[in-house]
């Protein structure tokens, strides 16, 4: 009896293993490779740099983040909280979070999608759905990044300010949570390298396997350069660039080195720790 249950469990777990393996063919067919994933990350840098430039157009506008400012309206949150909650709700209805590349900041409040579903490629292990480090991204953005890219002051454009914040947050979140895809392709390229560290749940070893200092240096340099190119004043006179940038390129570079890259790797590690579940 006992043996029979054991055999049953073994058969069942083999079966679930097979279903995970089965999508490895669709994986390659879907064209996810380390190169295509890196290309996607490179393209997302443009979105991040542009969104920071757009946010830096406004001063800090601290009333946007002040809960008492709108509490008279019964909001029970700041203006930015109000914009995030309601925008995410509309976008959830429109199907945004059906795509596994998107991770909401306030997942507890979301209505169901009302649009027909799209057959997004099933690339990730199902455990990916439980990885959301929105809290760390939120803290990093409001605590560190925002004060370093905005000028002091108040121009009253709180609603536009909050909308720009959400654009930045979404771009950062997409990039950082893309770590799930990075981890998946790295794992599939050489499972034998990762499996021992996953079985022993060794975070340090995984982090080491995932780290490529030369790639990270290149990314930091490139985003700094993008901030220079995208953020300069464009004039028809040649050689008119006075070295004024809309966001400081070295801050963008530092943002990547200190937060974006480490948080992406945190997602990669979290994902890999569950990859064999
Ligand atoms: C927040 O808003 C309230 C109401 O407008 C105001 O009295 C208070 O000074 C603001 N707090 C900060 C830190 O600006
Ligand atoms: C901003 C923030 O912390 N948002 C959410 C992150 O995700 C958890 C659930 O996974 C929510 O409870 C948080 O409110």
Image (spheres, grey):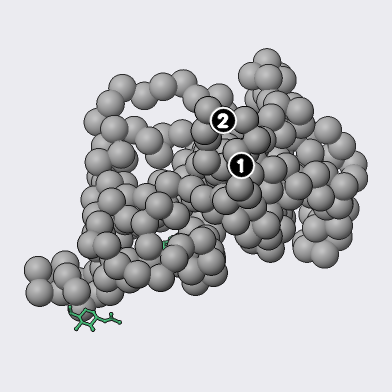
Give the quarter the ligand 2 occupies: bottom left
Is 84 in front, or is 32? Answer: 84
- The 10 Å Cα crowd at callout 2, few under 14, some 14 to 19, many 20 or more, is few
Residue 266 seen in the figure:
no
Residue at which label 2 appears: 237
Residue at 56% of width from left, 42% of height from top? 232
| Image coordinates for residue 205, horizontal then vertical, percent | 86, 60
Residue at 60% of width from left, 56% of height from top? 248
Residue at which label 1 appears: 241
The answer to which image quadrant residue 144 occupies is bottom right
Residue at 76% of width from left, 28% of height from top? 35
Q: Establish whether ligand 1 lies closer than 8 Å to the Cβ of label 1.
A: no
| Image coordinates for residue 123, horizontal then vertical, percent | 62, 31
Element on which disc 1 rests: loop
Q: Establish whether ligand 1 lies closer than 8 Å to the Cβ of label 2.
A: no
Residue at 52% of width from left, 35% of height from top? 234
């Amino acid at each position: 009896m006992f043996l029979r249950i054991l055999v049953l469990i073994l058969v069942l777990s083999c079966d679930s293993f097979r279903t995970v393996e089965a999508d490895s063919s669709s994986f390659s067919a879907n064209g996810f490779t380390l190169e295509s994933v890196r290309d996607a990350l490179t393209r997302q840098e443009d979105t991040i740099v542009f969104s920071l430039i757009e946010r830096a157009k406004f001063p800090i506008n601290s009333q946007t983040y002040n809960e008492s400012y709108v509490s008279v309206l019964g909001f029970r949150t700041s203006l930015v909280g109000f914009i995030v909650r309601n925008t995410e709700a509309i976008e959830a209805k429109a199907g945004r979070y059906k795509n596994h590349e998107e991770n909401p900041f306030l997942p507890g409040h979301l209505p169901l999608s009302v649009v027909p579903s799209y057959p997004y490629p099933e690339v990730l292990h199902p455990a990916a759905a439980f990885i959301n480090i929105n809290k760390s991204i939120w803290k990093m953005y409001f605590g560190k990044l925002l004060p370093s890219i905005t000028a002091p002051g108040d121009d009253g454009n709180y609603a536009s300010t909050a909308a720009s914040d959400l654009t930045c947050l979404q771009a950062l979140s997409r990039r950082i949570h893309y770590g799930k895809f990075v981890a998946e392709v790295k794992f599939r390229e050489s499972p034998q390298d990762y499996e021992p560290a996953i079985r022993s749940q060794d975070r340090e070893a995984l982090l080491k396997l995932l780290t490529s200092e030369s790639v990270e240096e290149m990314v930091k340099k490139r985003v700094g350069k993008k901030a220079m190119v995208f953020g300069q004043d464009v004039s028809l006179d040649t050689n008119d660039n006075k070295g004024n940038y809309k966001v400081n390129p070295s801050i963008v570079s530092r943002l990547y080195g200190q937060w974006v890259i480490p948080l992406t790797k945190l997602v990669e590690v979290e994902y890999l720790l569950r990859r064999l579940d």
